[in-house]
Amino acid sequence: MRNLIFLLLLIIISCSNNTSNNKEDTNNYTNNYVNINYTQSNSKILIAYFTWADNTVVENPSSIDPDAETSASVLPIGNAALIAGWIQEETGGDLFSIKTQNKYSSDYDECLNQARKERDNNERPRLTEKISNIDDYDVIFLGFPNWWYTCPMAVFTFVESYDLSGKTIIPFCTHGTGGLARTIRDLKNLLPDDCKVLEPIGIYRPEVKTSKNKVLDWLRKLDY
């Protein structure tokens, strides 16, 4: 009888631990998962990117001044998405947009205020989707804007959600006058020691639309 009671206690404890672990695994996600399979026969390349345009809702797009400096990043396609598309054309990799559950304001100043709060609190915004076959990829191009001299916190959520050991990470960043700032340093601090981080590219935000040749030259220097 004692043995039976002891066995039942072990089962209860085990179930409790499994429930706890499952809560931890899904803490940064909703129940929506995406499974992307690589398309190239000789390459396993993922192009993941975070862009403001995919993480906000513009209620009245016609009210946006297309000549304004911020309009290119708030209206589809966003700056990082544009560069990601060029990389995809050249490498044949799979595109994945990093999207947050809670959207940012479409007002530039309000968006930056929210981003600063997340940075100051070292937050990890919840994402809407997760790649279930991340092990299929050997190379990850990772794109983002410079928000307050570092990466958007959602990029850190993405990085910390997977075991990226042994993978090659290739950052690309859109920025204002702050350049790359601490984006690459902060990113490297979150990656496993055996990750290989190749030379990043930074594109000045007002010049993104005319930077395709610059991006292609960068890819060729990296042998991609």
Image (cartoon, grey):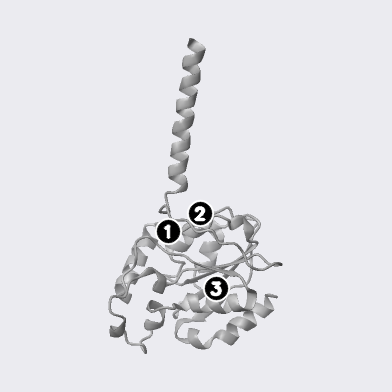
As helix, strand or loop, the secondary structure at mark 3 comes to strand
Residue at 45% of width from left, 45% of height from top?
24
User: Tag 1, which secondary structure?
Assistant: loop
User: Which of the two residues, 212 or 202, is positioned nearer the viewer here?
Assistant: 212
Which residue of the protein is positioned furthest toward the top in this rendering? 1
Residue 154's spot in the image, x, y percent? 44, 62
The correct choice, above or below, for 171 with respect to 163 in the image is: below
Q: Residue at x 36, y 66 (%)?
A: 116
Location of mark 1 (residue): 127
Name the secondary structure under disc 2. Answer: loop
Q: Quadrant of the C terminus?
A: bottom right
Label 3 Cα crowd, 10 Å radius (few <14 / some 14-19 / many 20+): many
Q: Earlier in the sequence, mark 2 or mark 3?
A: 2
User: Which of the 4 quarters of the picture holds residue 128?
Assistant: bottom left
Mark 1 vs mark 3: in front: 1
Hey, what amino acid is under mark 3? Answer: Phe
Sequence-first tag of 1 and 2: 1
How far apart are labels 1 and 2 at the CA level? Answer: 10 Å
Circle 2 packing at 10 Å, graded few (<14), some (14-19), many (20+), is some
123 or 25, which is in the foreground? 25
The amino acid on which the numbered mark 1 sits, given as a three-letter code, is: Leu
Q: Marks 2 and 1: in contact by CB < 8 Å?
A: yes
Q: Are marks 1 and 3 in contact (CB under 8 Å)?
A: no
| Position in image of residue 27 (x %, y %) | 42, 49
The residue that label 3 is drawn on is 172
Q: Is residue 179 left or right of residue 56?
A: right
* Disc 2 versus disc 3: nearer the observer: 2
Amino acid type, mark 2: Ser
Measure the alpha-carbon separation of dots 2 and 3. Answer: 20 Å
**Disc assigned to residue 161:** 2
